[in-house]
Amino acid sequence: MDHSKSMQITHGHSGVFAALGSAFLFGAGTPLAKLLLEHVSPWMLAGLLYLGSGLGLAIYRMARRLQTPRLNPGEARWLVAAVLCGGGIAPVLLMLGLAGMPASHASLLLNAEAVLTTLLAWAVFRENLGRRIALGMLAIVAGALVLGWPQQGQGLVQEVPLTSLWPAVAVVLACLFWALDNNFTRKVSLSDASWIACIKGLAAGATNLALAFALGAALPAPGRLAAAMLVGFLAYGVSLALFVVALRHLGASRTGAYFSTAPFVGALFSIVFFAEPVSWQLGLASALMAWGIWLHLTEHHAHAHLHEVLAHAHLHTHGGDDDDGHHTHQHHPVVTGPHTHAHSHEPQKHSHPHYPDAHHRHKH
């Protein structure tokens, strides 16, 4: 295997680890948020979670003395849209849904985010979607349907009050807006991941807190306030920064597939630490979703492809273990180590295993 092929695989593995780390942190945060909802209103909690993520990352960036990056032309509108969908609307819907259903069930319903992310990436943003990814997506949908099967009543046909469906609908709607957020964020994923997550956290946190206060909500006790912001920093801030890194290397649909492990983490935390019951629905849904995720994780994609002329700016290296084989331009004097500047990619045709990352968004 030549150097460029091995580097593409290495970068893909980095994206996988980032996506799984993001999923673990977010999944663990769902049952913790459910616990906090006993004392904090949904809208207030959504604001505190995101504000905690934004402030925590801002402190991290100041401690590291990181400079504000510049977006490529046309990227600002995608970032604004991502903040509105993923930071302003989705977390409020999730908190409203969590207030009316078990955390373990809400955690598994969050798998809909991966499905909707994949559908949008394929149908709207033209990201390649193979049969294996499609079949895995159908398995995840089947698991979500099993999870929504009525638990009470003896007959197969029974009336289900619309009010009892609202929590599940709210969670699925939250997934839709997060799916939009994921595809919008992919458009800016070459920028500094911690900066993107920081901006989204501060903007969404401030907006949701203002709305919460306008609706008459009050700040919780200092201990619960600190707990909410700590959960937000880890489950939303650090998780989102890792998610952006994964988007950079894997594209939206594959990152969404790996991130769909998050609900299993949430369900496991709910059962182990909060003693929530294990139902037949939970078991069957978990099996279907696990099969779907396995199909996603075992996907292999390689073919001859052509790179068109491309000009942009992002962090990259020349040579060494971090070189992906697509940055062959020269520097005078020679520059070593990670660096950022505007650069152009010349046309190139080759074949190697790859993901739909920033340098592989070609047509199929």
Image (spheres, rainbow, N blue to C red):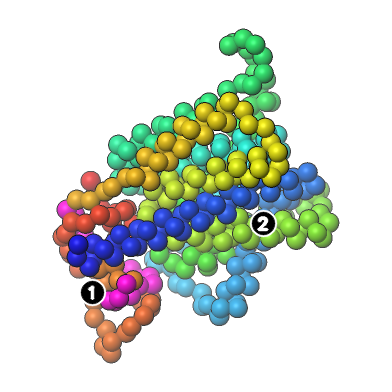
State the SS at label 1. loop
Residue drawn at x 56%, y 37% as measured from the top left: 108
Residue range of the region highlighted in magenta in the rendering: 304-321
What is the three-letter code of the residue carrying label 1? Thr
Helix, strand or loop status at disc 2? helix
Q: Residue at x 28, y 47 (%)?
A: 300
- Label 2 vs 1, first from the N-terminus: 2
Question: Is residue 39 in the magenta section?
Answer: no
Q: Residue furthest front?
A: 272
Q: Which amino acid is tagged 2?
A: Val
Whole-number angstrom distance, CA of label 2 to CA of label 1: 42 Å
Q: In this view of the protein, which residue sits in the foreground, 62 or 29?
A: 29
**In the drawing, what numbered circle is on residue 81?**
none
> How many neighbours does mark 2 have within 10 angstroms: few (below 14), some (14-19), or many (20 or more)?
many
- Asked whether the residues under the numbered discs 2 and 1 touch, taking CB atoms below 8 Å apart as contact, a structural biologist would say no
Which sits in the foreground, 206 or 272? Answer: 272
Give the answer, above or below, for where 174 lies relative to 12. Answer: above
Mark 1 nearby-residue class (10 Å; few <14, some 14–19, many ≥20) = some
Residue 160 lies in quadrant: top right
Q: Residue at x 44, y 61 (%)?
A: 245
Instruction: Tell me residue 137's x, y (percent).
Output: 41, 36
- Residue 59 visible (yes or no): yes
**Main secondary structure found in the magenta portion:** strand
Between residue 291 and residue 307, name the one nearer to us.
291
- Corner quadrant of residue 223: bottom right
The residue that mark 1 highlights is 328
Q: Which residue is mark 2?
A: 231
Tell us which disc is closer to us: 2 or 1.
2
In this rendered view, identify the residue nearer to me: 244 or 136.
136
Left or right: where does residue 276 sit relative to residue 247?
right
- Quarter occupied by the N terminus: bottom left
